[in-house]
Image (tube, rainbow, N blue to C red):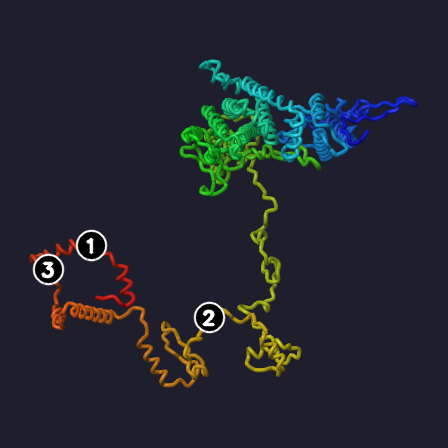
Amino acid sequence: MSSCLPLDKLHVKVEVGKSKTEDVPALHPRWVQKIQFLTYHAPPLNLSDRGQCEEWADRLKFIEEDLHLALQLPHDKFWCQIVFDETFVSLIDSYLRYAPRTHDALIELPVDTKSRHDEVHRLVFMTCLRMATHKESKEHHITPSVFGEILYENFLFDIPKLLDLCVLYGQGNNQLLHKMIDNIFTTQPKYNDDLQGTIPTILQVFDNIRAKCGLADVSGLTPKKLTDQSQERSELVSMSSTDFQDVVFYLADTGTTLASFLEVYPPACVLFFKEDFVHQLAQLYESVIPQVVSSIKKRKFDSHSHKTLLRQKTQEAKNSLLKVVHLIINTYCIQPILENVGAEERVEDFIQLFTSMLNERRFLADFESRHRIENYQEILLQSPIEIDEMRLQYIQDAINSAFTTHGRRRKPTGGTNRGGRTSPDGSPGPMEDAGAVGGGAMGGAVGGAMGGASSAIDSAVPVNDFDVETYEAEGACAARKTGVELESLISSVKDLLPDLGEGFIEVCLEEMDYNLERVINAVLEDKLPPSLQDLDRTMPKEIPQPVDAPKSLLDGRRNVYDNDEFDVFSRDAVDTSRIFQGKQNKMDKISLDDKTLGSDDKFRLNEAYGYVVETLNADEASQMAELYDDEYDDTYDTNNVGADDADSADELLHGRPCTVPRILGGGNQGRTRGVSSESDSQDSDEEKKRDQFVQDPALLRQRAEQRRISQRRGQGRRFGQGQGHIQREQAQDGPKHDVKGKAKGHGQEADVLKNRKFKEKNKAARGNHNRRYMSDKKRMGFGGGP
């Protein structure tokens, strides 16, 4: 048979007897290798137990060797091992179930054990990648339909395994995982039905969490008693620490797993939306998360680190659940609107979804703090679909109201006028610092698929005090105080209780939400929490040492001229003979007795000092004349200065006279000797005709009077009036209309009052209409009148 046939149709001839052969399928149990694969176990909780650690390390060693051997098998033998060896499938299943996640607590492993676990982590991913590929080459492949049946009927993959793969390897291998899962769903459509059937199971998990917390049904089908709320809160506070920790960890794990899966495989968001998953998730968030946050503040823990860990896990749950809602809305509603595929239906689904969630005010406030509803609405309004803006405004107003009551906006990274977020009016408390736990909690990417996967065990999740957000302005999860504010609180406590150490006071303030009165009362009444009773009350404050801090300002200085010959900060002695001010004249350093002078140097000496060092021949002189001198100032070469002047013969011979600026008190001074008396008389005339900055007012009045006389003369000639009329007008001393009259208190004549009334009535005819024109005219020397 041809080797190009798919594996499901390939047969191999096997000799049964001396003269008999039998055709055996290439995919048959008889080709299975005799390998006993061990199942994976989670890391031991007690790392101090040497026996358990060594046993676990030996198990990792055997698993590593077996996986190496399995991956080296040829295509047909590998698939025989996968399909017919149950121990192989059990190994993959056990690792996906019990391997530490990136969001799990940090476990410190020995270096050799950690590196071995990293290798096992990489090999498991390589095995799953090969299991999800139906065609490795032209010669080694499986029919896609048969490949899908093999995966589904032998339970090689199922929805829980796909979820585990995404949460384990999604951070560093998003694209590769997407191809794997898409290939599985494409070749076997039954996985879509399984995923659709898994969604109600996840919703049932949410109901189980509510029941575990003692919370009432939020569906509204069961009537609530008046005492239910108090009983629910008391049950959350009174349950054991182990059960409470399981609830918090279960919330964080469920949210992180769903967010990883939907981020890797976005087509699944369509199924989640159609099952009303977003609304159910919002109800879970509204009922469970606030009660868990409140219980963490009220409960007593054995240690402060345990309380901090639960705060962090609660924040991880919040971030991951909000991310799930954002991914579903963005994939199902926003992307089709941007691509204009079924936009009208998606717009209506978006509005209906948020309208149904308006009662979940705390959820909407937290969702608005991370994913602004305005960004979604802007995309909706830009679509060609007609949208009722009143409905969108109603949703926006409801979200703003919820945010005003319960929300806290993260601090903007840029200016408020450049996209930075600011808190709406009425929002309680200041804005928080940026840095949500979403990236840190799920950070620590598992390494690349093809080389060196980083183990989830050493993916440290640092506890950042500013990564925790709360619904109230104070509380156990409030942002940590630092700097002057913290020092002020410590000094206030130390003034009343001077025997306490600053370190102990700082821990007490952090534990009691930086409430000064609570700390003082707890110390005086000896009612400290259990986590603070064993601390040393004289504990000093820890001073953080900066890593590789510069010793001085000069040590941290960085400059392009560092460590050069003139750097006074790196050397004590500097050659001052090489330092000069301004441009250096290189001709000063040339000696006339130097026999090594070149033609270029000789020509420059001739130009600079006006004498010839040596007689140059004609060729050298012409060559030197054509050389470009970069010291020559060619700024005004393009201006044809003096080309059109009528220069006299004396000017051409002796040079143009130099004029000293008038502000310096000088006139024209000739640079050459022998200036004639005629030029002196011309200079004196020019001084008389010089343009003054402020002209003589008397001269201006004289010119104006002459213009008025000429104008009157022209008018008289036009209307047949003679010189006598002009003289009569010039002889009139007083104005036509007397508005000045007598002094105040002596009475006024009727003509004066009439003239004043006329002037007041008609003063707007020309007033303020030609002020600029007359001002310009006066400035140019043509204005009239004093």
Q: Position of residue 637 (x, y in %)?
A: 49, 71
Q: Earlier in the sequence, mark 3 or mark 1?
A: 3
Residue that mark 2 sits on: 639
Q: Secondary structure at mark 3?
A: loop
Is residue 143 shown to the viewer in this render? yes
- Report helix, strand or loop for mark 1: helix
Q: Check disc 3 and give the amino acid type.
A: Ala
Give the foreground label among 3 and 1.
Answer: 1
Query: Residue drawn 74% across and 33% down?
Result: 136
Disc 1 marks a residue whose amino acid type is Ala
Q: Tell me which label, 3 or 2, sits earlier in the chain.
A: 2
Mark 3 vs mark 2, foreground winner is: 2
Residue with the mark numbered 3: 743
Q: Position of residue 767 (x, y in %)?
A: 22, 56
Q: Position of residue 165 (x, y in %)?
A: 66, 29
> Marks 3 and 2, how far apart in space?
66 Å
